Image (tube, rainbow, N blue to C red):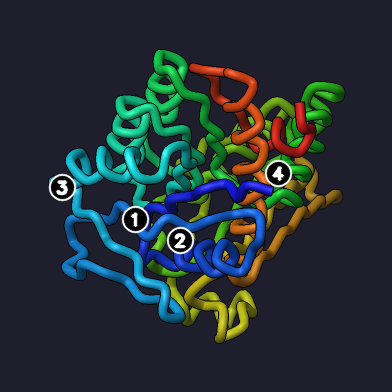
Amino acid sequence: MERIKIMVNGIPGNVAVNLVKHIVNSEKFELLPYSLTGPEISDDVFILDKFQINLIQPLKKQVIIEDIKKDAGLFISIDFTHPSAVNANAEFYCKNNLPFIMGTTGGNRKQLHETVISSHIPAVIAPNMAKQIVGFQAMMEYAAQSFPGIFKGYSLEIKESHQNGKADTSGTAKAMVEYFNELGTRFSTDEIIKIRDPNVQEKEWGVPEEFLGGHAWHTYTLISEDKTVKFSFTHNVNGRSIYAKGALDAVEYLYDKINQGIKGKVFSMIDVLKKK
């Protein structure tokens, strides 16, 4: 079986590095020894278990990507970079006909989708690569469509806790706001409570110390107008392996779509789960 070639962008970021560990231990995939990185990274290489990855600065990426394409042929890029780079990276992938998985949150999402739609490549774009959480979101979407307004009059509180290096508000929490509003609440994404203080996370939330540098804890609380009824939904993720596994499922899905000749189309993780 021919292995699918992957280029992971965002090294030395933690999610990207965790993903690399999964790829190098898999028989399905082949890791290309290159990674697009940010201008703040001064290192030229990153070494993981004797595997050397060349880090490509933004000003050099256009020239280097041409050589990579000549040597590697078809490969899929997985983006776990920085919210500020989302749209520029997507434009780069589309300009160079590089099918990609966008796991980075932030950026102008409408523009992101439009960039792919007007291109000659397909892409998987998802604010969350964790399959189980995406499945939970799908259940919430079904509830919103089937029982609109069922929580009318209820107040909503959303709290999300991530490592203090996460720059933006959780994309998953933002996505959930839409479903809850369809269910009858009145809530703005600006009201999401964002926790980034390690002391609060460990002492008040109970996040294990070893995962303070990499976790995603979310709680959604609904309370009735008379305060007699309370609903609470929680999903807590420690570490980053769940995202790596989901991203690799997305790679297989996108690879199949590429072989079908599909171009200019955006797929979601729900598409990946349904295998549509």
Find disc 3 in the rendering and name its residue.
Answer: 60
In terms of depth relative to the viewer, which is nearer, 155 or 6? 6
Q: CA distance from mark 2 to mark 1?
A: 9 Å
What amino acid is labelled 1 in the image?
Ser
Find disc 1 in the rendering and name its residue.
Answer: 35
Q: Nearer the viewer, mark 3 or mark 4?
A: 3
What amino acid is labelled 4 in the image?
Val
Q: Residue at x 40, y 51 (%)?
A: 168
How packed mark 2 is, by other alpha carbons closer than 10 Å (few <14, some 14-19, many 20 or more), is many
Residue, far top: 118
The answer to which quarter of the image holds residue 236 is bottom right
Q: Nearer the viewer, mark 1 or mark 4?
A: 1
Q: CA distance from mark 3 to mark 1?
A: 12 Å
Q: Which of the two discs, 2 and 1, labels the residue nearer the N terminus?
A: 2
Is mark 1 in CB contact (under 8 Å) with mark 4? no
How packed mark 3 is, by other alpha carbons closer than 10 Å (few <14, some 14-19, many 20 or more), is few
Image coords of residue 25 (percent x, y): 61, 69
Q: Which of the two discs, 2 and 4, labels the residue nearer the N terminus?
A: 2
How packed mark 4 is, by other alpha carbons closer than 10 Å (few <14, some 14-19, many 20 or more), is many
Q: Residue at x 52, y 17 (%)?
A: 263
Task: Say what secondary structure mark 1 lies in.
Answer: strand
In terms of depth relative to the viewer, which is nearer, 61 or 202? 61
Find disc 4 in the rendering and name its residue.
Answer: 134
Q: Is residue 166 among the parts visible in the rendering?
A: yes
Find disc 2 in the rendering and name its residue.
Answer: 16
Q: Which of the two discs, 3 and 1, labels the residue nearer the N terminus?
A: 1
Task: Say what secondary structure mark 2 lies in.
Answer: helix
Q: Is residue 84 among the parts visible in the rendering?
A: no
Task: Say what secondary structure mark 3 lies in.
Answer: helix
